[in-house]
Image: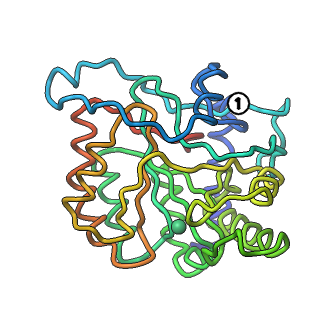
Amino acid sequence: MQKDQLFTRRRMLLAGAAALGAAGTAGLIVAGSDEEGARIAAHAPAPAPAPAPAPGPQARQAPLKSSAFRLQPLTGGAPPHSAPRKLKVRTEPIFRIPEHGRQMMLTFDDGPNPDYTPHILDTLAKHDVRAMFFLCGECVEVNPHLVARMAEDGHVVGNHTWTHPLLTTLDRSEIKSEMERTSHIIEKFYGDLPQWFRAPYGAWNKATFQLGAEMGMEPMAWTIDTTDWDTPGTDVIIDRVESGAAPGVVILSHDAGGDRSQTVEAIQEWLPYLLDSGYHLTVPNRRV
Ligand code: ZN
């Protein structure tokens, strides 16, 4: 993408953020003003998923909230849009989102990848669904057009380090470098700094929480792992999603890091199933 196009898109993003108002510009994962819901979402251990509702006309009648869950400031007034926010340092990541409106969230890690990510983006677009993508800086560097498409399609991107290391084996300066470089290249091609961070392998430690907070990023884990990284077969992936579906669940899939053709096939089956089952698939701080 040309630099002037980037600037144009950035201006559009800024205009959209301004239109959303303070509640849409910065802060913490919450649903409406329900701070208790956010606290529970942030601290509850990965739960046993509730039974999935039966698909069909009856499920479709379930009332849905049309809005994505919003972000609220943790530390007073909203900072300049492109500056990292200072956040409270957590001691564990967020495993779930609030259950209001039968919300679930889809997340895809390790990309972008030219062989798989476009197909996943196509499927999401076909069903008018937004998702989160946790990106590795070294993949962003060689696939910037896919990051630009994520922004244009309304998806939210997060920081998944530059080289996908096991952060708990690195010293603080190395962790900082992995995270900082990735945030900067995401800002360059997505149009804004990421507000979410996910540690590779889910390996968190005190330094990752502290550095993430300093860089304005909340730590986002997941509730259900599709195990697609182990290429267990398309049917197994579909079953993992459909049997694990429940309000508040965050689904983990991968659009890179190996052969992800099963992931690409599986989402074509399980995404319409979730929608037919009455789930509202949402993202934080949705782009407009
Ligand atoms: Zn990963």
Query: Going 48% across and 70% down the picture, which residue do you hit?
Result: 112
Q: Residue furthest bottom?
A: 142
The quarter of the picture where the N terminus appears is: bottom right
Query: Going 81% across and 36% down the picture, which residue do you hit?
Result: 78
* Residue located beneath label 1 in the image: 72
- 135 or 228: nearer the eye? 228
Q: Is residue 126 left or right of residue 139?
A: left
**Looking at the image, what colour scheme do you see?**
rainbow
Q: In the rendered structure, which amino acid carries the disc numbered 1?
A: Gln
Q: Secondary structure at mark 1?
A: strand
Instruction: State the image quarter where residue 89 is shown.
Output: top right
Q: Is residue 221 above or below residue 162?
A: above
Q: How many numbered callouts?
A: 1
Q: Residue 266 appears at what percent x and percent y?
A: 24, 59
Q: Is residue 210 left or right of residue 7?
A: right
- 240 or 74: nearer the eye? 240
Query: Going 72% across and 74% down the picture, which residue do you hit?
Result: 169
The quarter of the picture where the C terminus appears is: top right
Instruction: State the image quarter where residue 158 is shown.
Output: bottom right
Badge 1, how many Cα within 10 Å: few under 14, some, many 20+? Answer: many
Q: Residue 278 appears at what percent x and percent y?
A: 28, 29
Q: Is residue 11 above or below residue 117?
A: above
- 230 or 151: nearer the eye? 230
Q: Residue 185 appears at what percent x and percent y?
A: 68, 70
Q: Is residue 246 left or right of residue 10?
A: left
Query: Going 53% across and 56% down the picture, which residue do you hit?
Result: 151
Q: Residue 125 appears at what percent x and percent y?
A: 34, 52
Q: Is mark 1 within 8 Å of ligand 1?
A: no
